[in-house]
Image (tube, rainbow, N blue to C red):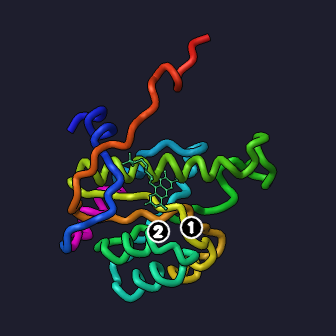
Amino acid sequence: MNAIDCIKTRRSIRKFQDKAVDPALIEQIVEAASYAPTWKNTQTARYYAITDPELKSKIANECLMGYEHNASIINGAPVLIVMGTIHGRAGYEKDGSFTTSKEDRWEVFDAGVCCQTFCLAAHDAGLGTVIMGVYDEKDVADAVGLPEGQIASCLIALGYPDQDPSAPKRKEVSELLTFK
Ligand SMILES: Cc1cc2nc3c(=O)[nH]c(=O)nc-3n(C[C@H](O)[C@H](O)[C@H](O)COP(=O)(O)O)c2cc1C
């Protein structure tokens, strides 16, 4: 698949086939995602692939602030990726001060870049993903057992797609782009 096709045909997938994903394929996707650009190449993203049904349903049922929509996606997905971010590096100087006025927001920026790279690599490998932002950070971190200093940056459901949604409408380039 060429890059533009991969970018344009990736869709958020919320229904998955009842089929396990080979751990070697998940490793391959994370290896591709490791090529994402990051603040001073700090590479603070960490990926937790949750396949244990008990842990997955604990996250779905107890860590999503009661958001049923995401709970049913996770319960129906063979894999839940919890993306962790090592806090305190992207956007920081070695002495612990912030490099720019964006302060620590660069670490969230890096997480987004890594997350999309992961989703595109998964799509190229024939897998579907949806990024989920509605969850309780602390509850997820506790359930997964994230190491001290790591935050839960996003959840990504992963599996073989069982739907082929059309693309939600995109804005015109004329609205998005300004030449000056
Ligand atoms: C930061 C972020 C958070 C999102 N959170 C959710 C979510 O909690 N649940 C969900 O079903 N989709 C979620 N989405 C998916 C968006 O709804 C989806 O990307 C958007 O509608 C465009 O559709 P597409 O991904 O198929 O192009 C999220 C996407 C992003 C980037």
Disc number placed over residue 152 in the picture, else none: 1
Residue 107 left/right relative to 54: right
- Crowding near the residue tagged with mark 2, few <14, some 14–19, many ≥20 C-alpha atoms within 10 Å: many
Q: Quadrant of residue 148?
A: bottom right
Residue 68 magenta-drawn? no
Q: Image quarter for residue 89? A: bottom right
Identify residue type, mark 2.
Answer: Val
Please give the name of the residue rendered at 61% of the width and 71% of the height, measured from the top-left corner: 137
Residue at 44% in and 69% down: 70
Q: What secondary structure is the magenta-colored segment mainly?
A: helix
Q: Is residue 130 left or right of residue 113?
A: left
Q: Badge 1: few (under 14), some or many (20 or more) residues near its Cα, within 10 Å?
A: many
Residue picked out by circle 2: 82
> What is the distance, in whole Å, between disc 1 and disc 2 at their CAs?
7 Å
In the image, residue 141 lies at what x, y percent?
57, 76
Residue 146: percent from the left, percent from the top?
56, 76
Rendered location of residue 3, percent (x, y) = 29, 35
Residue drawn at the location 65% of the way across and 70% of the way down: 149
Between discs 1 and 2, the one toward the N terminus: 2
Query: Splitting the image into 4 quarters, where does residue 142 fall?
Result: bottom right
Front-lying residue, 71 or 50: 71
- Note whether ligand 1 is within 8 Å of mark 1: no
In the foreground, 179 or 1: 179
> Magenta residues?
20-30
The quadrant the C terminus occupies is top right
Residue toward you, 25 or 139: 139
